[in-house]
Amino acid sequence: MSDFEYPRPQLVRDNWQNLNGKWQFAFDDAREYCRPDEGIEWTHEINVPYAPETKLSGIHDTGFHNVVWYRLAFDLERRPGRTILHFGAVDYHAKVWVNDRLVTTHEGGHTSFWADITDALVDGARQVIVLRAEDDPHDLQKPRGKQDWQLEPHSIWYPRTTGIWQTVWVEQVPDTYIKGVRWTPHYDGFEIGCEILAAGARREGLSVEVKLWHGEVLLADDDYKLMGQEANRKIAISDPGIDDSRNDLLWSPERPTLLDVELTLRCDGKVLETVRSYTALRSVAINRDRFMLNGRPYPLKLVLDQGYWPDSGITAPNDAALKRDVELAKAMGFNGVRKHQKIEDPRYLYWADKLGLMVWEEMPSAYSFSPRSMTRLIKEWQEAIERDYSHPCVIVWVPFNESWGVPNLTSMQAHRNAVEALYHMTRMMDSTRPVIGNDGWEASATDILGIHDYDSDPQKIKARYEVTDPARTLFDQRRPGGRILTLDGFPHRGQPIVLTEFGGIAFDTSLAEDDGSTWGYSRANTAESFHQHYTELLKVVNETQMFSGFCYTQFADTYQEANGLLNADRTPKIPLEQISAATRNVRLVVPDPPEPA
């Protein structure tokens, strides 16, 4: 396995070239240059796709930098058709030139973009890409997630990410090609919605053949005409009727069944190209106070995952690290993760799809409210939903967290309007998944009521949430964190209640005693006390009938926060089987030692 596999796992072509590796690099703090032909002094070499703030980039400069430049000269074997240049993510505003020709611009630090560079290529020479990334480290009006605006990381904010931080790659396609595919499972009818979009030269007589497999069994082999350059159809799957046979076809964390797809684009019967994809049949829904998976109540056992690594920041060291994070979450007894303040790499979502791990996708926050900040956030959130819509692992969308970016929800109508607008826009773009308008407190428009409560005493947690009249006792009198849980005009309507942040027990295995360099919401000083505290907390939360699920803080230590179940290098602080038993609220069975010979 290479360090980085095919970057877009739901639309795979064989003819692609990975451009990660050594690029020329320059800081431009004085904003001296506007174009690549202005004599830029290339002072550094950087290892793409790692941000210059990280060790793996080879630069490891965590200072304030407004503008950075990248340059790569590479060989490309030209083929008939079009050449598409892709960037997984560039933080924050990117301009891209190929052979001194501007080919695209993009704003937004967490979503992918591309450019057709065919007309900018030159024959008989190396191709040269230059990218300018502008990323004001002090700008609080852009979605920045956990990136600190102070020089040194403080509290719950971490080092910044500047420039390229996901894979750069090129692919060669026919003059008319499949640009995108969108999958929508329809559980009730045992159907898969299939939307296919072609791009490039417009042609009459386009059709696409869709083959769908479950393992070796061919479920469908359909041919659709494209109206213009689009096809939108439902693929019927034979419903076996019996639950056991139905479950074989359904996706869940316990049985992550994926359906393999082959798409062949034709023009008047002639094959233009064939690409590979995958989808799954599953449903997520809300029924009264329960979260439902595939038509059945399903307890959510989530862990909050910030998606940082010690030497590479928000970029995984390699594809194997993404897979390992999914495996570790499952090994600790969780059936899902809440990806916190990060739009994760599609390769992570691929492994969550394949191995069976549910994902709550959350928009990184801006921290200052203005029409500009909301315009930026809306644009990038739309791109994230469109990019990740087809991943079966994604089960919930979360546009806001803890009123970040909309701090005056209790007093300013404009802030309320922003949350409600994002909620309804998200529901408009995807009616198949629940949406949490604002997670943590001060809820208005929402399908799930998320509560953040870091009380470290399990008995206080039990007393707070084992109540007979939650509308009065919880929502009017006991306010976790001193915040109201629902805004005026939005009383709790019976939606599922999920404890979406709690715990945060700090235990730094590298320190003999607490020296104040790390922190959490509570502390444990030994492995035994850490295990006991976690077990007691999870027992209470698992057994509280009010909750439809929980999300423990957090997956792994993240810089100064030592409240992970794993160390930052992903080694467990206590045995994984102990964590798993406590997460699932079951007794750990320790095998008897073997009899002496």
Image: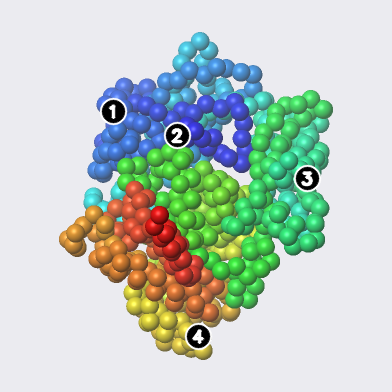
For marks 1 and 3, give the CA distance: 53 Å
For marks 4 and 2, give the CA distance: 50 Å
- Mark identifier at residue 44: 1
Pinpoint residue 315: horizontal percent, then vertical percent.
40, 43
Residue at image mark 3? 219
Residue at image mark 4? 470
Foreground disc of the pair 4, 2: 2
For marks 4 and 1, give the CA distance: 59 Å
Residue type of the residue flagged with mark 3? Leu
> In this rendering, would 387 be left or right of 29?
right
Count of numbered marks: 4
Foreground disc of the pair 2, 1: 2
For marks 2 and 3, give the CA distance: 34 Å
Which residue is at a point 66% across and 68% down the rendered structure image? 296
Residue type of the residue flagged with mark 1? His
Nearer-N-terminus badge (2/3): 2
Viewer-closest of 380 and 18: 18
> In this rendering, would 84 be left or right of 95?
right
SS under mark 3: strand
Tell me where residue 21 sits by quadrant: top left
- Look at the picture and state if 471 lies above or below 51: below
SS under mark 1: strand
Q: Is residue 113 visible?
A: yes
SS under mark 2: loop
Residue at image mark 2? 3
